[in-house]
Amino acid sequence: MTFESHEAYFANVPEAVRPSLAAIQAKVESLLPDASRCISYGMPAFRRRRLFFYFAAFKKHIGVYPPVTRDAALIEALAPYRGAKGNLSFPLDRPLPIDLIGRVAVALYRQYGSE
């Protein structure tokens, strides 16, 4: 399915997940006010010069992409959420670590968005 905005994407996920997606969106925007909302690969995303942060709701988790590769301390903190390819999976049945996701957004912004 193709979406034209973050809001259109949010409207198509279960209502219980929407506050988590909105919290991620708000966190990214508060930390990186020069980032722009967009949709890429059918997911809400942010860009500045380049796409640097994607997030999406799935049946049992919220995914955050792409993997963080340049911040060793952050990579270690993300270990409980990292999949085999480094992508992040935050289970819906646990509290969302929004500050940690904010750190991810800033790291990805530095890695991709400021180039």
Image (tube, rainbow, N blue to C red):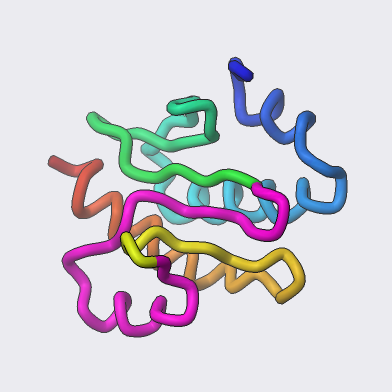
Task: Tell whether 111 sits left or right of 96.
Answer: left
> Which residue is drawn at the image coordinates 37% and 38% (left, top)?
34
Image location (x, y in percent) of residue 78:
41, 76
Give the position of the N terminus as an image quadrant: top right
**Location of residue 44 with respect to 59 vertically, above or below:** above
Residue at the right extreme of this rendering: 15
User: In the rendered image, which quarter contains the C terminus?
Assistant: top left
Horizontal and vertical percent for residue 27? 55, 55
- Where, by quadrant of the figure, is residue 44 drawn? top right
Question: Hey, which quadrant is residue 67 in on the image?
Answer: bottom left
Q: Position of residue 17 (x, y in %)?
A: 77, 51
Residue furthest front as drawn: 84
- Does residue 21 appear to the left or right of 84 in the view shown? right
Q: Is residue 13 above or below residue 40?
A: below
Pinpoint residue 49: horizontal percent, then vertical percent: 23, 30
Say which residue appears at 58% left-offset and 66% top-offset.
90
| Pick the front one: 30 or 7 | 7
Instruction: Read off the magenta span.
Output: 58-83
Count of labels in the image: 0
Q: Residue at x 65, y 67 (%)?
A: 91
Reply yes or no: does residue 112 show up in magenta.
Answer: no
Instruction: From this view, report whether residue 110 is shown above or below residue 90.
Output: above
Q: Nearer the viewer, residue 113 or 83?
A: 83
Q: Nearer the viewer, residue 85 or 29?
A: 85
Q: Residue at x 72, y 35 (%)?
A: 10
